[in-house]
Image (cartoon, rainbow, N blue to C red):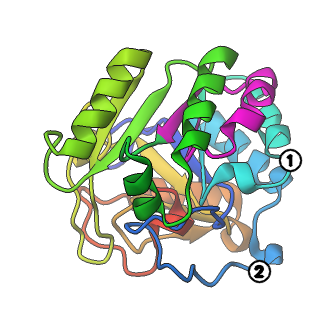
Amino acid sequence: MYDRFNRKINYLRISVTDRCNLRCIYCMPEEGIRLLPHDEILSFEEIFRVAETAVAMGVDKIRITGGEPLVRKNITDLVSMLAGLPGVNDLSMTTNGIYLEQYAEALAAAGLYRVNISLDSMDPERYRLITRTGDIHDVLKGIDAALHAGLTPVKINCVIKKSPLEKDARDVAAFCLEKGLEIRYIMEMNLKTGSFSKVIGGEGGDCAFCNRLRLTANGKVKPCLFSDLEYDVRTMGIREALTAALENKPKHGSANKTNAFCNIGG
């Protein structure tokens, strides 16, 4: 399917939860956020119906995000459901990696293709400072588990302030080279001010070639990360919400004052 600017839209990012086991300084306040009530969160069956309709309309690439998707109970069941959709050629997940050692084999068995793992520093103290609660050794074990399970290529998302030449970024790059991982540098963004740039080593952030729609954990289809536009699948209907998002997808991102990275999936 194509939007009004003739961009081919074939990618759906699905946020399955607004909950996270970390408190990264660029993502949420130290005290956390007001969490959505459980009855507002889409069930796996609802998510599947949205994905099924999106695939019928032309989506062939799906990414599961959060919050942190591995804190969602029985997440492998959803992976299995989505992996069984005819027409899905790429099913991936973005995770902080803390629980990946526990879930990697089950995710692979359920049909997940690959993972992107967030890692902004190789220094244990710096990592804890950035995430406020995280233990980098859990992430490193998760990376090894993902490689062992065949969730490849394993891609590392590294948030930077200004340049890949920053010490933390260079350390992560050296680690990726040693382990045979792919690295993506993501400039620190601000939804409220509309500050974003192209992902270095990846495809995100390039509005001229944007190919994605987003589904929030509470059922809003968003045509753009940096926009307040959203269309509710529960009140409008699934196809209607997807169509509205497609038809109203902006040419360029501006600002998003109604969402946060922790509840939209980045």
Q: Which residue is mark 2?
A: 37
- Please tell me which residue lies in front, 118 or 248: 118
Residue 192 place in picture, x, y as percent: 31, 77
- Res. 88 visible in picture: no
Does the magenta run of residues contain 108? yes
**CA separation, marks 1 and 2?**
18 Å
Residue 222 place in picture, x, y as percent: 49, 62
Does the magenta run of residues contain 140? no
Q: Is residue 46 above or below residue 81?
A: below
Q: Is residue 39 left or right of 2 when viewed as pictured?
A: right
Q: Is residue 5 above or below residue 109?
A: below
Mark 1 or mark 2, earlier in chain: 2
Disc 2 crowd rating (10 Å Cα; few below 14, some 14-19, many 20+) is few
Q: Quadrant of residue 32?
A: bottom right
* Residue drawn at x 29%, y 25% as measured from the top left: 174
Residue 182, numbered circle = none
* Residue drawn at x 47%, y 58% as measured from the top left: 128
* Residue drawn at x 77%, y 55% as measured from the top left: 72
Mark 1 belongs to which amino acid?
Asn
Specify start and end residues of the magenta stretch as a single range. Answer: 93-117
Which element carries disc 1, helix, strand or loop? loop
Residue 191 place in picture, x, y as percent: 33, 70
Disc 1 crowd rating (10 Å Cα; few below 14, some 14-19, many 20+) is few
Which element carries disc 2, helix, strand or loop? loop
Q: Quadrant of the C terminus?
A: bottom left
Mark 2 belongs to which amino acid?
Pro
* Residue drawn at x 75%, y 68% as measured from the top left: 41
- Please tell me which residue lies in front, 256 or 169: 169
